[in-house]
Image (cartoon, helix red, strand yellow):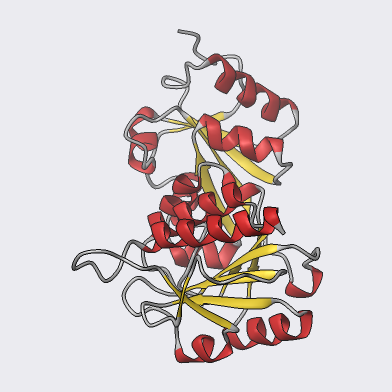
Amino acid sequence: MEVMHENKYAVVSYSRDPRFLTLRSLQTFQGRSRTGLYIIEGIRHLARAVENDTPIESVFLDSSVLSNPFGQKLARRLRKRGIPGVRLSHELYRNLTLAAEPQGIGTVLQQQWTPVEKLNMERNSLLLAVESIESPGNLGTIIRTAEAAGVTGIFILSQDCDPYDPAAVRATMGSLFSRKLIRCSPREFTDWAKSSGVAIVASSPAGLMDYKALRYRFPAILVIGSEKHGLSEQLIEAADFMVRITMSGNCDSINAAVATGVLLFEMASQRQGA
């Protein structure tokens, strides 16, 4: 195993070191909100970030774990670019990581938000709006699914819905870096959709039409509500179409991320056939 003694990052082994405390703070919503930064961890996530030219603030390593040759190459590449960083002791890295099998490398990145007025759309654009998802893992899975379905922009409509939560970032599997994220209020969102001619599609068990029976018109945006409470009355009233996913047996609901995938892929299929 090659240990990266050649890198010149300082070693941090004290849990009260300000550099480690800064990293720990980014595991909290307050820390991310205050700084506009967030953490990614693992070779795949870092490779996707580099591939998409995501601005990297700093890197942190555990040289005793970073044995993957490609991961070592990425670390050297960042160091040669002048990206600042630290080498954490094995104990501190283990205290920081969420991974069951840490790969020994992570980075601090700038959050990327696109102003709604700068969102460019085409005639057949497919977008997604998330009002409130309680589970960061669900949110990350939704973002990953959105990339697979060809969604170009994702609206985040509540302050407590955080795509930069470490668990959400991990669940995106790198899709976070290639999607445009827009944060705004439900009112700003509905005003934008109406003025831009975007069809708002909402999902509810009380929807009047099965999701496969509707002929969607584009550009369109699917709106997803919270796992527990669904969509707010404001967004239900603003919807141009309200669809339902017909279910069998005694089941009256499915996981929010699963429902999002079912609906997005039907919309994407119709868009390809249009």
Q: Residue at x 56, y 54 (%)?
A: 146
Q: Position of residue 72 (x, y in %)?
A: 57, 19
Q: Residue at x 61, y 62 (%)?
A: 36
Q: Is residue 48 left or right of residue 133?
A: right
Q: Position of residue 83 (x, y in %)?
A: 69, 36
Total marks in image = 0
From the viewer's perspective, is residue 212 above or below residue 149?
Answer: below
Q: Name the residue nearer the viewer: 18 or 151.
A: 151
From the viewer's perspective, is residue 122 above or below residue 171?
Answer: below
Q: Position of residue 226 (x, y in %)?
A: 39, 73
From the viewer's perspective, is residue 246 above or below residue 175?
Answer: below
Q: Position of residue 236 (x, y in %)?
A: 50, 87
Residue lying farthest top?
1
Q: Name the residue nearer the viewer: 153 or 241.
A: 241
Q: Residue at x 45, y 83 (%)?
A: 208
**Where is the C terminus found, in terms of image quarters?**
bottom right
Residue lying farthest front?
213
Q: Is residue 187 left or right of residue 158?
A: right
From the viewer's perspective, is residue 120 above or below residue 169?
Answer: below
Task: Kindly indicate the quadrant of the structure image that contains residue 190.
Answer: bottom right
Q: Name the residue nearer the viewer: 48 or 209.
A: 209
Q: Name the residue nearer the viewer: 5 or 205.
A: 205
**Where is the N terminus found, in terms of image quarters?**
top left
Task: Kindly indicate the quadrant of the structure image that contains residue 58.
Answer: top right
Q: Residue at x 52, y 51 (%)?
A: 145
